[in-house]
Amino acid sequence: MPLFDQHLHSWHSFDCEEAPEQSVRAAIEQGLAGMTFTDHFDTHPTEWPLCRYDYDLLQEAIAALRDKYGDQLFIGHGIEICYQPERMDFILDYLNSHTFDVVLLSVHWFGGRALHVRDHWAGLSPRTGTEAYLRTVLEAAEFAGTFVRDGQRMFDILGHLDLVKRYTQRFFGEADITPFSGLIDEILSASLAADLIPEINASTWRQGLDEPSPADWVVQRYAAMGGRCMSIGSDAHSAEHIGAGLREAATLLLENGIPAIAIFRNRQRELLPLP
Ligand SMILES: [Zn+2]
Ligand SMILES: [Zn+2]
């Protein structure tokens, strides 16, 4: 099965200390056909000073890795944009002035709260927090849709669309997205309209949940709406997790009506049919 890890981090992300070369070696050991670095681009005023995304440095590192390992697998230069409604002009300028293999759009903040900061959950229950998060994901997908004209896109992949469950699990011991299936449908439908490919993010399997983000029932709904492919990614923050869960994610796609994975090179989408 030709697998691409299309969501992973290196020391070019504030929360990761892994050398890109270690990750490439791990991907080769895993037998991956490709891997794309999607380091964090975080523009919230409290996170921007910590942001390590340096386009030229990353470009240089990837060029050297391609020289050394490019005959063994595809090595992509991507970016994980953190959706920040107040900062989109700056983000769009950045995207327009650089070239990427893939642009991931992810929601890590909702209504001025950071998903990953326990104190920011003050006054929220798992249920109200989940709903607020998913509404922001819907807003992000709709925002992406405003750029789709003449087959152009500003964003390629919608990252971990129900990642909120990782944090309701961590902070409250529960993770239930099923009451919000209507909102999930709206997100999937906005993604289809925006030509934004949802990913299956395998990281929640490593963090105490028994499902990826999103789960099988979401894949079924996406297939029923006409979705034909999704992206898969480990969201690895260390070399040992490169490729983790991708085989399981690909099998889950196939079993729930999605026959191909979407991969991106130079922003061009190709479909890799699953056997
Ligand atoms: Zn993310
Ligand atoms: Zn990530």
Image (cartoon, helix red, strand yellow):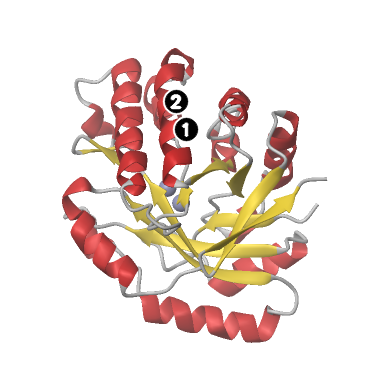
> Depth check: 69 or 150 in front?
150
Q: In which quarter of the image is residue 208?
A: top right
> Depth check: 178 or 148 in front?
148
Q: What residue type is labelled 2?
A: Ile
| Residue bearing the label numbered 1 | 188
> Depth check: 77 or 192 in front?
192
Which quarter shows the C terminus?
top right
Q: In this view, does 163 lie to the left or right of 19?
A: left
> Depth check: 146 or 161 in front?
146
Residue 131 rendering spot, x and y as whole percentages: 33, 22
| Residue bearing the label numbered 2 | 184
Dot 1: element: helix
Dot 2: element: helix
Residue 162 visible in the snapshot: no
Residue 249 rendering spot, x and y as whole percentages: 67, 40
Residue 115 visible in the snapshot: yes
